[in-house]
Amino acid sequence: MSTKGSSQKRGLLIVGSADVKRALSMSDCIEAVDKAMHALSSGGADVPLRTVMKLPGGRNFFGVMPGYLAEPRGLGTKIITIFPDNAQLGLSSHVGLVLLFDSEIGFPLAVMDAGEVTAIRTAAASAVATRALARHDASHLAILGTGEQAITHLEAISKVRTLRTVRVWGRSPDKAAAFAKEHGSRLGLKVEVAATAEAAVSGADIVCTVTSSREPILNGAWLQKGAHVNLVGASQLVSREADDDVVALSRFFVDSRVSARAEAGELKHAMDAGLVSDSHVLGEIGEVLNGKVVGRTGNHDITVYKSLGVAAQDMAAARIIYDRAVRDGIGTTVPFFGH
């Protein structure tokens, strides 16, 4: 849909959290992120490395992620704060805005809730990687973590594999139990609570780590042959959710080589230990999708997708949200342009 000249007529569209959910289904986001990762690895996207500012105290961050995507068309940025302790207040840890611009005339089109966009598109990216790298018969899911990303990952992975068993582990048994009851029922899945991370991972052929841990909560010794792992929670060089064995034993893939070199703590730690080199990164997930790089070579491979998140994913999601919102009258349009 062409937006040339339409920004002045429509004003600026505001899309809050509830409206993001209305406009962006998980299935649609998975397909949009798939296209975005294709584009990222074939010259159809420009995503400079994000700028992250550490705030006083050392636990909270302010980040800016600009990006351009040719298809689905998107230009803009995500501005986000990360306050891990918000969870204790019943608040989201990731709060901010996604700004979408018209790539033909440069006018701002929309402002969207970044927390909800991030929650959906991050899980969608893991689903894209799982579809490309996990065994076709993979059906046993382990989720380490019980927060926002655990919720969306359960839904996303269920879209790309038929799940027979799901186990969840979290540091709070009460939160894990509440998660299993509410979200298993919502999706029609039986979700079991594991007493330990090792117990959750035992027998799993898909593992998602979605915690805020700075130290490993997943050990390579626990993984069975043929497992696929999505490492999602850690996004700084000083943080890692998996030990060196997880990295060294795996066929290791990333969303962006540039981001991985700058921000993948699991990879850096294994490299510093002398267990792997830079060449251990076999490719970007987009290169697997494009057929340029082989993903899984057999049923015994352990595959890892290191997810750091790139603005191309946000722009793909934002484009869907904007087009659906305009079509269906979702969100609030406010006067903005002074002509």
Image (tube, helix red, strand yellow):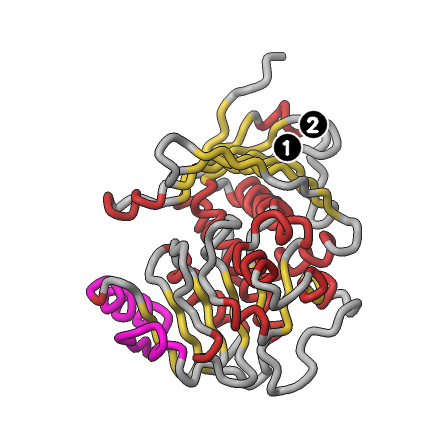
Q: Nearer the viewer, residue 216 or 294?
A: 216
Count residues near mark 1 (Cα–Cα under 10 Å), then give few for <14, some for 14-19, many for 20+: many
Callout 1 touching callout 2 (CB < 8 Å):
yes
> What residue do we see at 74% from left, 74% from top?
294
Q: Residue furthest left?
A: 174
- At numbered mark 2, what does the secondary structure look like: helix, strand or loop? loop
Tell me where the magenta segment starts and ends, as one range. Answer: 174-201
- Which residue occupies the foreground of this view, 33 or 12? 33
Measured as percent of width and height from the top left, residue 140 is found at: 44, 81
Q: Is residue 11 left or right of residue 199?
A: right
What residue is at 45 percent from the left and 56 percent from the top? 233
Residue 124 against residue 203 in the figure, above or below: above
| For residue 197, above or below residue 297 | above
Give how far across and how far down residue 81 sits, in percent: 43, 37
Give the mark nearest the N terminus, 1 or 2: 1
Residue 158 location in percent, x, y?
47, 72
Which numbered circle lies on residue 106? 2
Overall secondary structure of the magenta section:
helix
Give how far apart the Cα atoms at labels 1 and 2 are: 6 Å
Task: Pinpoint residue 336: horizontal percent, then vertical percent.
Answer: 54, 20
Type of amino acid under label 1: Phe
Tell me, yes or no, whether the highlighted magenta stretch contains residue 206: no
Which secondary structure, mark 1? strand
- Which label sits on residue 41? none
* Side (left or right) of 236 relative to 203: right
Quarter of the rendering occupied by the N terminus: top right
Instruction: Count neighbours of disc 2 (C-alpha within 10 A) and say few if under 14, some if 14 to 19, many if 20 or more.
Output: few
Q: Is residue 266 above or below residue 301?
A: above
Image quadrant assignment for residue 250: bottom right
Residue 181 lies in the magenta-colored region: yes
Residue at the disc numbered 1: 101
Which quarter of the picture shows residue 106? top right
